[in-house]
Image: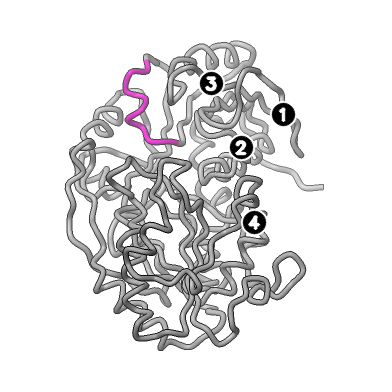
Amino acid sequence: MSTYEKLRGSLVLSSNSPGAPTGYGVQAEELVSRAVRHGLNVAVLSNYGLEARTEIKKIQHGKYAHYPKGLRPYSDDVIRLWYDDFVSQHKGPGALMTLYDVWVYNDLVFEDPILPWVPLDHLTMPPLVRKFLDRDNVHPIAMSEHGQRQMSDAGLDSTYIPHGVNTQVFKPTSKIFGRPTREYMEIPEDAFLVSIVAANKANKILHRKALGEQLLAFATFRRKFPNSFLYLHMEPSRAYGGFDIPTILKAVGLDESCVRIADRDRLRIGYAQKELAALYSTSDVLLNATYGEGFGVPTVEAQACGTRVITSSWTASADLAGPDSWLVDGQPWWDDPQSAFFQVPHVGSIVGALEQASDAPRGTSQSSIEFAKEFDFEKVWLTKWIPYLRERFGE
């Protein structure tokens, strides 16, 4: 029977509910399960995924308390209440961890230690982010090397702990729903398949995932390479505040016969990770050239499946590009609401990367797989999280 180093105290996480079909939900689930495994008292303060009730969730190595979202959009109205309720029931030190954009917590009155796992997706640090990180009781965790560099340039100390992926699931996978993946997708085996895996969410003007630029680039590329297909793993409508994908496809001149879009019902239910692994594995390249990433989990997931990536040469994306990747250029774009710069990928640079990718050897990239292993959940936990948490919760 395995024994695990024991930690003592209460860790309270403010984020999406563990297991919610979001990037934060996946990271929260892995973090919580391991924290419980090592003996911490754990509570999750949900800002998405649980309403109207508090529950005790039983998991493999114990249990954790799951508190519901509040009345304000980011649930900062109940953080103090839920935190005090939970920590008062246990002995030992307590700390609040956040896994979300930190500027949403600027109105939070809180004196105990705050450990924000910080996404920094701009070229320059937004002032509202800096305002929160300047608090005396805040001890930031950088989820990317870019984030750590940006905080260091601002005179802020931080600890680097990246997001992780489950490399036992995200690995070369040949079938989906019991069928060869390309047969299921109705895509010829000899076709060049480009995939984009991204949330279609926006603020009506700015789409951080650069869907317009990336779709235009693929349309331009396909005129020269007609035996190419595009898979979009996202909601195609404006349902979540994003852009209308059919409108963009029409604007860039892409025939929908060469485009495959994720099944909307399965998206609502949530694709299993092994199903997503099959979709990555059958792709010749993942296209993820965005305005900026705080981390960018799909970039690592795809490489864990042996799929090469095209991504941005700035923010966290540049740090997540393995040896078989292609980096694109861009130019700064002022994000006025955040008073900071994003960077817009050059369409021509994306087209050039697609052409290079189409000329590269097909098949599984072992170099990409080896690179992605550095982000395996368990490895990150043992080499990064345990030393960090030991300083705060060690017995």
Q: Amino acid at mark 3?
A: Pro
- The local secondary structure at tag 3 comes to loop
Question: How far is the residue under mark 4 from the one under mark 1?
Answer: 22 Å
What residue appears at the point 33 percent right and 49 percent down from the top-left corner? 207
Q: Which comes sooner in the sequence, label 4 or label 1? A: 1
- The local secondary structure at tag 1 comes to strand
The reply to whether callout 2 and callout 4 are in contact (CB within 8 Å) is no
In front: 183, or 10?
183
Give the percent coordinates (x, y) of residue 158.
34, 41
The reply to whether callout 3 and callout 4 are in contact (CB within 8 Å) is no
Give the percent coordinates (x, y) of residue 32.
61, 37
Q: Which comes sooner in the sequence, label 2 or label 1? A: 2
Q: Which residue is mark 1?
A: 57
389 to 190, vertically: above or below: above
Give the percent coordinates (x, y) of residue 395.
60, 29
Give the percent coordinates (x, y) of residue 248.
36, 59
Residue 247 within the segment the image draws in magenta: no
Q: Which residues are magenta?
A: 100-108
Q: Is 198 left or right of 157, judged from the image as shown? A: right
254 to 262, vertically: above or below: below
What residue appears at the point 51 percent right and 18 percent down from the top-left corner? 70
Q: Which residue is mark 3?
A: 93
Q: Which residue is mark 2?
A: 18
Question: How far is the residue under mark 3 from the one under mark 2?
Answer: 23 Å
The reply to whether callout 2 and callout 1 are in contact (CB within 8 Å) is yes
Q: Which residue is mark 4?
A: 273
Q: Residues within 10 Å of mark 2 (few under 14, many from 20)?
A: many
Question: How far is the residue under mark 3 from the one under mark 4?
Answer: 35 Å
146 to 305, vertically: above or below: above
> In the rendering, which numbered label is found on residue 88?
none
